[in-house]
Image (cartoon, rainbow, N blue to C red):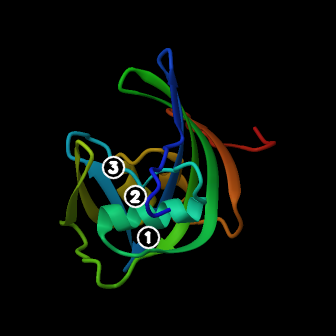
Amino acid sequence: MAGRKLIRIKQKKEGRVFQMRVAGLAFREGHLLVHRATHETFWTIPGGRAEIGETSEQTLVREMDEELGVTATVNRLLWSVENFFHYEGADFHEYGLYYLMEIPDSFPFHPSAIVHRNTDGKSELEFRWVEATKSALTALDLPPYFLAEQIEDLPESPRHLVWHDGDLDIVAAGKT
């Protein structure tokens, strides 16, 4: 990819947005790594938009290098998610891939403090570790909200979900 301009997988039209996002769940000492833009009230799983011409694993490795300055090891796919939500005046349809990943032990850990800051475009990002429990993720406000429901029981094989922001129930492919 060196020397080529990457093109994000994102389409905007008439107040609607489609994008592809890849995120990684990293755990340490019973905690999950999360991040947010400092102007936001909610937190998310680290990751970013996929680029045309790279695999989802390459996207995740690139994003962790850009945001954390480390080389992540991408493990198994946990979820593929069709995520529908409203944000900044637009209706989003996001195709998300959520992987289990490992980041080097050299990346800082503290059970409650901000451990890393970075600038991504116009956004200031901050990273922290949060207890990997349903109650901690619910209190933190971590969309998509199915993550809090499933954090204590990660799937053994990939699951496909359709998630509408605000839903109390997860709609799995082929099930209601």
**Residue assigned mark 1:** 26
Q: Nearer the viewer, residue 18 or 32?
A: 18
Q: Residues within 10 Å of mark 3 (few under 14, many from 20)?
A: many
Query: Residue 66: which quarter of the image?
Result: bottom left
Q: Position of residue 130 (x, y in %)?
A: 32, 64
Residue type highlighted by circle 2: Pro
Q: Disc 3 versus disc 1: distance between alpha carbons?
A: 14 Å
Which residue appears at 29% of the width and 50% of the height? Answer: 36
> As drawn, which residue projects farthest toward the bottom?
105
Q: Disc 2 versus disc 3: distance between alpha carbons?
A: 9 Å
- Element assignment for label 2: loop
Figure disc tally: 3
Residue type highlighted by circle 3: Trp
Q: Which mark is residue 67?
A: none
Between discs 1 and 2, the one toward the N terminus: 1
Residue type highlighted by circle 1: Ala
Q: Position of residue 77 (x, y in %)?
A: 63, 64
Image vertical order of residue 134 relative to residue 71, above or below: above
Q: Are marks 1 and 2 in contact (CB under 8 Å)?
A: yes
Q: Nearer the viewer, residue 74 or 110?
A: 74
Q: Position of residue 26 (x, y in %)?
A: 43, 70
Q: Which mark lies nearer to you, 2 or 3?
A: 2
- Element assignment for label 1: loop
